[in-house]
Amino acid sequence: MEAQKKKIILDVDTGTDDAIAIVLAALEERFDLLGICTVSGNIEVKLTTENTLRVLTFCGKQEEIGVYKGSDLPLVSTLLPWTAQALGIRSEIDLRTGKRWPLPRREGTRLDKSEEHPEYLPLPPSKTREREESAVYWLIKTLLAQEENSVTFIQVGPATNLALALRADPRIKKAIKEIVIMGGGDRVTNTSPAAEFNTWADPEAMEIVLQSGRDILMVPLDATHSAYVTLSDAEKIAAIGTAPALLVAGLIRSLASSYINSHEEMRQYQAAPIHDALAVCAALHPQVLSEVVHCNCHVDISGGWAYGQTIVDKRKLLDSETKNCRFARKADRNFFLKWAMEVLSKDREKRPHN
Ligand code: RIB
Ligand code: CA
């Protein structure tokens, strides 16, 4: 009897590592991917949506998997460059990148991600469009129709869509078995001295999700950086020879190149953390993670220097005190790579001409 598939929903801000996560989630035969929600993050939502459609089209999955366009603005923060324009907030030009910055610009924030996440992925324009329903509407409709504790929500961009859905109709919680979040950082940050990008882009949304009372597994930068992928790993993946494998290898090469000049300290030269794909792997194989602490984690929403910081309570908590998530500090890069290779190799067996 065929093992029951794991129902998942993916929420992305496609981006380069999101694209790898989408390929692997769509091809992993043990997943039942109910749909993909898009959100502003790495780039604006109209671009993250187009990129998501391009990836699915390139993998031949565009008819099978629906894409639902989500929020183009964070709940409260005005720090994403285009938010200022959308909200008509006076902003200043960043002399280095030419980007318009909303005020107040917080010192130490670095957001020039264009090398890591181009506006358009290097793929043919999509042949399909996003589905009619908005992401939040579809999330509520879909989750209300699912059995209790049956869906794993994998969030690899800012948490805006799920936060809005949770506030609009808390009944959806019942269907959510687990929320796997690529986000946060304790010893490792990237966008500001205190914060990781997904959390920094919409701190209030991440705090709402973290306090939702659901079972939460956080895959922060501490873990993703320990599961880095190298250029020689990319060559092994390329050797699988299918279009999805060649796409993943190309995206890894692009990320490895962008991380050479990145302010995220890499442990290995010409390597890159594939943040979002590790979260997808952990949703199926949590054993890929280690040093996982069950703790209480909040997001700083006070709007100062630490805006968007994930505050991990390392103190010895009493049993009666809230522990709202499992926070992973490490990951096994060999396990992660082996899983990715297996997914792509099985796809070649099933679709040799793809
Ligand atoms: O900090 C890493 C996260 O920010 C990843 O999800 C990447 O895609 C960006 O969204
Ligand atoms: Ca992402």
Image (cartoon, grey):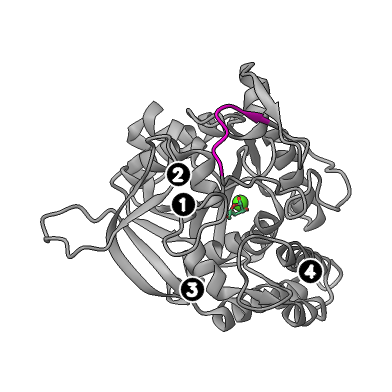
Label 4, label 3: how far apart the Cα atoms are: 40 Å
In which quadrant of the rendered view does residue 143 lie?
top left
Tag 1–tag 2 contact (CB < 8 Å) = yes
Range drawn in magenta: 101-107
**Could you say whether the residue bearing mark 4 is in a helix, strand or loop?**
helix
First reached walking from the N terminus: tag 2 or tag 4 = 4
Q: Is any part of residue 49 visible from this angle?
A: yes
Label 1, label 3: how far apart the Cα atoms are: 49 Å
Question: Label 1 sits on what residue type?
Answer: Ala
Q: Nearer the viewer, mark 4 or mark 3?
A: 4
Q: Horizontal placement of 97 versus 208: left or right?
A: right
In which quadrant of the rendered view does residue 328 lie?
bottom left
Residue that label 1 marks: 194
In the picture as drawn, the residue positioned furthest to the top comes out as 88
Tag 1–tag 4 contact (CB < 8 Å) = no
Estimate the x, y position of residue 63 in percent, counting from the top left.
Answer: 74, 46
**Could you say whether the residue bearing mark 2 is in a helix, strand or loop?**
loop
Label 3, label 2: how far apart the Cα atoms are: 46 Å
Label 2, label 4: how far apart the Cα atoms are: 29 Å
Please, what is the dominant secondary structure of the magenta stretch? loop
Question: Label 3 sits on what residue type?
Answer: Met
Residue that label 3 marks: 1
Estimate the x, y position of residue 15 in percent, counting from the top left.
Answer: 69, 50
| Disc assigned to residue 308 | 2
**Could you say whether the residue bearing mark 3 is in a helix, strand or loop?**
loop
First reached walking from the N terminus: tag 3 or tag 2 = 3
Label 1, label 2: how far apart the Cα atoms are: 7 Å
First reached walking from the N terminus: tag 1 or tag 2 = 1
Vertical position of residue 162 compared to residue 239: above or below: above
Estimate the x, y position of residue 119 in percent, counting from the top left.
Answer: 78, 43
Residue that label 4 marks: 253
